[in-house]
């Protein structure tokens, strides 16, 4: 039996975390109420997948869903066996199941819904099917029944007018989340303040300079946060003479009329930085841990991150994906003399280089947060080490 002291400590940690995040009642862009096992049945399918693979992936995603609320260690979820495992024991429903659904999309699955039946009824019927028929549910291009309701779509990317449609390639991404002790040990990021306008950045021996411009055409304002990460996606803690520090930097534009871009410069510790979240308000944000973009800076680098354009979105932009909260694009203008003068003053212009972005970086999730992925078309896929 767990001691009362241990149990109370764990409970206190959970309550502390829940108080720290206003989004504790939601999961990803998928609203938890969408998947109600009393009124709906569904199953997951990936062309070419076998029933055992689907079962293993769904069990892992169910465990991931619970872990996002600190309710069980990662990879120690229930297992369901092969018969009916394509559906899983998901009577708990709610946010955990929405997280699991997001996880299955990240792993490259599609979800098919069956109306006129609940999940238990469908699971019982499925269990009586011959193995070769079950295999069609798992891996056929067109399964025996059901209506396609969800698949991965890069909905948070903002396309520019005239852009060719980005290929909707399936993901093959395994999301991860920390346990509560690890998450508490990380603590919050320490946001690096931007260099005041008109001031020349002064990087130290282990620091780099990053520059960016941000615009919000609707005037709603934009908040764009990057945090430092290890190559594995874990928090990128920096040890200094002043103690532990988890650096991040956030560009913020205030609500304003017009489309005037704001310029930012940050002096940051060298390392890997990933796009952590974007938002227009104080709490209404989405964290990107189903794959995101990242870049690497070495000590002494002066890097232009490009021009960020962000707009709020309230409606679905893809019929088979939940509505994003915002959309963001990153343009990388040529390093011409005009941009050098605008962004890199005081002798830094000759060192300025454009950022090299990687996409599908394995940024570990933040507990109790709304989650999704963010792909940057044309960027190289993260291969496990910076380029």
Image (tube, rainbow, N blue to C red):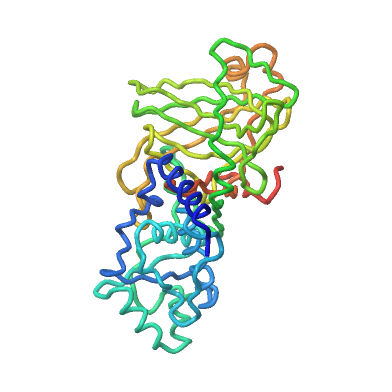
Height in image: 187 above or below 368?
above
Which residue is farthest front?
Answer: 4
The residue at 55%/65% (across/down) is 76
Residue situated in front as seen by the camera: 187 or 357: 187
- Measuring from the top left, give residue 378's x and y in whole percent: 57, 45
- Measuring from the top left, give residue 318's x and y in whole percent: 36, 52
Residue 270 location, quadrant: top right
Q: Say left or right for 297 vs 85.
A: right
Which residue is farthest right?
Answer: 205
Number of numbered discs overlaid on the protein picture: 0
Residue situated in front as seen by the camera: 274 or 327: 274
The residue at 72%/20% (across/down) is 204
Residue 173 location, quadrant: bottom right
Quadrant where the C terminus sits is: top right
Q: Say left or right for 308 vs 335.
A: left
Q: Say left or right for 141 vs 30.
A: right
- Measuring from the top left, give residue 334's x and y in whole percent: 60, 27
- Measuring from the top left, give residue 140's x and y in whole percent: 46, 76
Residue situated in front as seen by the camera: 68 or 272: 68
Height in image: 153 above or below 226?
below
The residue at 34%/26% (across/down) is 219
Height in image: 294 above or below 118?
above
Residue 274 location, quadrant: top right
Height in image: 264 above or below 127?
above
């Amino acid at each position: 039996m767990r001691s009362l002291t241990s149990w109370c400590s764990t409970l206190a940690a959970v309550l502390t975390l829940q108080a720290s995040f206003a989004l504790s009642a939601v999961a990803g862009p998928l609203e938890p109420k969408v998947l109600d096992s009393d009124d709906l049945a569904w199953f997951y399918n990936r062309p070419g997948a076998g029933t055992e693979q689907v079962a293993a992936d769904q069990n892992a995603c169910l465990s991931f869903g619970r872990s996002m609320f600190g309710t069980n260690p990662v990879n120690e979820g229930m297992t369901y066996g092969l018969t009916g495992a394509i559906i899983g024991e998901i009577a708990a429903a709610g946010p955990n199941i929405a997280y699991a659904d997001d996880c299955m999309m990240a792993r490259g699955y599609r979800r098919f819904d069956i109306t006129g039946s609940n999940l238990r009824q469908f699971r019982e019927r499925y269990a009586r099917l011959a193995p070769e028929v079950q295999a069609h549910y798992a891996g056929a291009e067109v399964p025996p029944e059901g209506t396609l309701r969800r698949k991965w779509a890069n909905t948070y990317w903002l396309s520019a007018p005239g852009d060719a449609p980005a290929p909707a390639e399936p993901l093959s991404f395994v999301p991860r989340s920390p346990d509560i002790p690890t998450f508490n040990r990380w603590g919050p990021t320490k946001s690096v303040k931007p260099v005041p306008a008109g001031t020349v950045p002064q990087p130290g021996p282990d620091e780099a300079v990053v520059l960016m411009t941000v615009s919000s055409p609707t005037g709603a304002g934009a908040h764009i946060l990057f945090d430092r990460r290890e190559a594995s996606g874990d928090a990128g803690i920096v040890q200094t003479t002043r103690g532990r520090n988890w650096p991040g930097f956030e560009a913020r534009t205030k609500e304003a009329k017009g489309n005037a871009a704001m310029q930012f410069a940050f002096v940051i510790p060298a390392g890997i930085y990933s796009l952590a979240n974007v938002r227009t308000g104080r709490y209404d944000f989405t964290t990107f841990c189903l794959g995101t973009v990242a870049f690497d800076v070495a000590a002494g680098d002066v890097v232009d991150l490009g021009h960020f354009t962000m707009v709020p979105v309230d409606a679905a932009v893809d019929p088979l994906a939940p509505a994003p909260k915002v959309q963001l694009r990153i343009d990388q203008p040529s390093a011409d003399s005009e941009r050098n003068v605008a962004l890199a003053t005081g002798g830094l212009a000759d060192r300025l280089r454009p950022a090299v972005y990687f996409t599908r970086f394995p940024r570990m999730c933040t507990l109790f947060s709304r989650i999704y992925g963010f792909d940057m078309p044309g960027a190289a896929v993260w291969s496990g080490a910076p380029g």
